Image (cartoon, grey):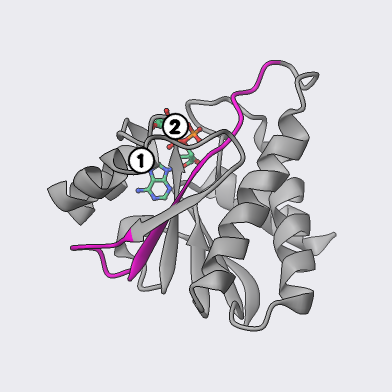
Amino acid sequence: MGLTCMLGDITNVKADAIVNAANTSLLGGGGVDGAIHRAAGPELLEECRALHGCRTGEAKITKGYRLLAHYVIHTPGPIWHGGNQNEADLLKNSYYNSLQLAEQYQCKTVAFPSISTGVYRYPLGLAAPIAVNTITEFLKTSHYVQDVIMVCFDSVTKQAYEDAMMV
Ligand code: APR
């Protein structure tokens, strides 16, 4: 299938790995981070505590516990500060490093939320092309990762990714 996008709640998606738009503490929060921790149960936070945080743009993997997904890949995306603090590269790194981990763990299907475009205020119109281009490039050479789903929580976000996929 390659890269597709859907409207939905990522905690209900049956993928080998779902990606969490985390923060650098990896100790949970609001938004999709909060939803994933609620759905996975308390063991997820226990495992995250042992990871001792994660730098922006990097990624760490845990089990999925009560989620349908086998794994959760946690990546802190960049906070938007106007675009002059390396935000674009950091966002690209979040997608790329998450996919690298999925490949390393032999995942076939990976589901992403729209990283950084909520609380972190990354403009959707700038983030979507970065996500789509990074994922598309990765899929050209990946061996295990075959299908990536952008799981959009609202129709405006879904439209932005569909537009970026049309280019
Ligand atoms: N499924 C899919 N997408 C979701 C869900 C969900 N259940 N809940 C929220 N989203 C969407 C948001 O609507 C937004 O499009 O995920 C996208 C990312 O928004 P945030 O969750 O706010 O993530 P981000 O902008 O990366 O900010 C991360 O927010 O929740 C805290 O702990 C988190 O500090 C970190 C920060």
Q: In the picture shown, does residue 82 fall above or below 97?
A: above
Asked whether the beta carbons under mark 1 and mark 2 sit within 8 Å of each other, the answer is yes
Residue at position x 50%, y 32% in the image: 118
Q: In the picture shown, does residue 125 fall above or below 19?
A: above
Left or right relative to 31: residue 7: right
Residue 33: mark in rendering: 1
Disc on the earlier residue, 1 or 2: 2
Residue at position x 30%, y 49% in the image: 36
What secondary structure is the stretch in magenta mostly built from? loop
Question: At numbered mark 1, what does the secondary structure look like: helix, strand or loop?
Answer: helix
Front in this rendered view, residue 143 or 84? 143
Q: Quadrant of residue 82?
A: top right
Left or right relative to 98: residue 82: right
The verdict on residue 8 being magenta is: no
Cα separation, mark 1 vs mark 2, equals 8 Å
Q: In the picture shown, does residue 146 fall above or below 128?
A: below
The span picked out in magenta is 63-81
Numbered label tally: 2
Residue type (three-letter) at the residue carrying disc 2: Asn
Residue at position x 61%, y 70% in the image: 4
Front in this rendered view, residue 23 or 53? 53
Q: Give the residue pinned by disc 2.
A: 23
Where the N terminus falls, by quadrant?
Answer: bottom right
* Residue 92: image location, x then y, percent: 71, 46
* Residue 138: image location, x then y, percent: 73, 67
* Image-quarter location of ligand 1: top left
Dot 1: within a 10 Å radius of its alpha carbon, few (fewer than 14), some, or many (20 or more) residues?
Answer: some
Residue depth check, mark 1 versus mark 2: number of the one nearer the observer: 2
